Amino acid sequence: MLDYDDVFQLMKDCLSTGLPTKIKAQLARASTFVFLGFDFEKWHTQMLLRFLGERPGISKFAIKGEKPNGEDTCSFLVNGFKIKFEKGEKDGETFFDSLYRHCEEKNMLRTLVNQFSGKQVAVMRLAYAGKLATALEELLKHLRDPDDRNAATLLSGRLHQLEAEKTRTDSRDYWVEWNKIAYGVIQLAKKLEP
């Protein structure tokens, strides 16, 4: 009769090299693992936990989320892999809130600097939201360089033509052209003065 340990050992032996070399190297350097969105009832997730658990010095795993529904699975994961299911430490606090707070307390957070101005970000957001006509209008209000204004005007014309022919255009061709225009809008937004 085989138990889980025997099954995992058999599978490991069948996978003669274990994990791929690149993954093994990354995992060897890591000291903490946070699992997000994993289904711990699946055999392949349990196999990954088995590989990770063989590393020296591993004492527990922290997983964001609720324990699995099955009592047997939950007991197996908690006892077999020393998994701790984490939530936020305070009421109404998520795992990420708690993690952020702890990192902030230990001065582990990097200061992020936005490389774009408010005008640039506003136009880019319009483009990302699919509002190219509005993004082009904003560009034309703020662009100072005549060549950039001409480029925005040409993009506006291309967009107008594309929309006018939308019903007669293959959807694959439509989206290729639409994305080219969106890319042009974003590139012009980067040229806006801060």
Image (cartoon, rainbow, N blue to C red):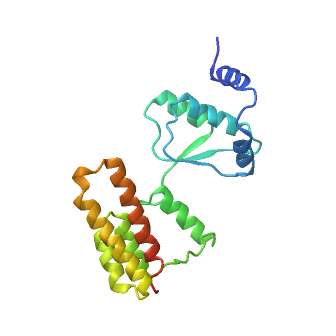
In this rendered view, identify the residue nearer to me: 173 or 93.
173
In the depicted structure, whether residue 72 falls above or below residue 103: above
Q: Where residue 156 appears, x then y in whole percent? A: 31, 72
In this rendered view, identify the residue nearer to me: 76 or 168.
168
Which residue sits furthest right?
56
Q: Quadrant of residue 123?
A: bottom left
Residue found 51% across the figure and 40% down from its top: 38
Q: Where residue 185 appears, x then y in whole percent? A: 40, 71
Which residue sits furthest top?
1
Q: Quadrant of residue 22?
A: top right
Is residue 54 toward the left or the right of residue 121 in the image? right
Is residue 113 toward the left or the right of residue 189 in the image? right
Residue found 64% across the figure and 15% down from its top: 2
Residue found 36% across the figure and 59% down from its top: 178
In the depicted structure, whether residue 55 falls above or below residue 169: above
How many labels were placed on the picture? 0
In this rendered view, identify the residue nearer to me: 129 or 184.
184
Q: Quadrant of residue 129?
A: bottom left
Residue found 75% across the figure and 31% down from its top: 17
Q: Where residue 151 appears, x then y in whole percent? A: 40, 76
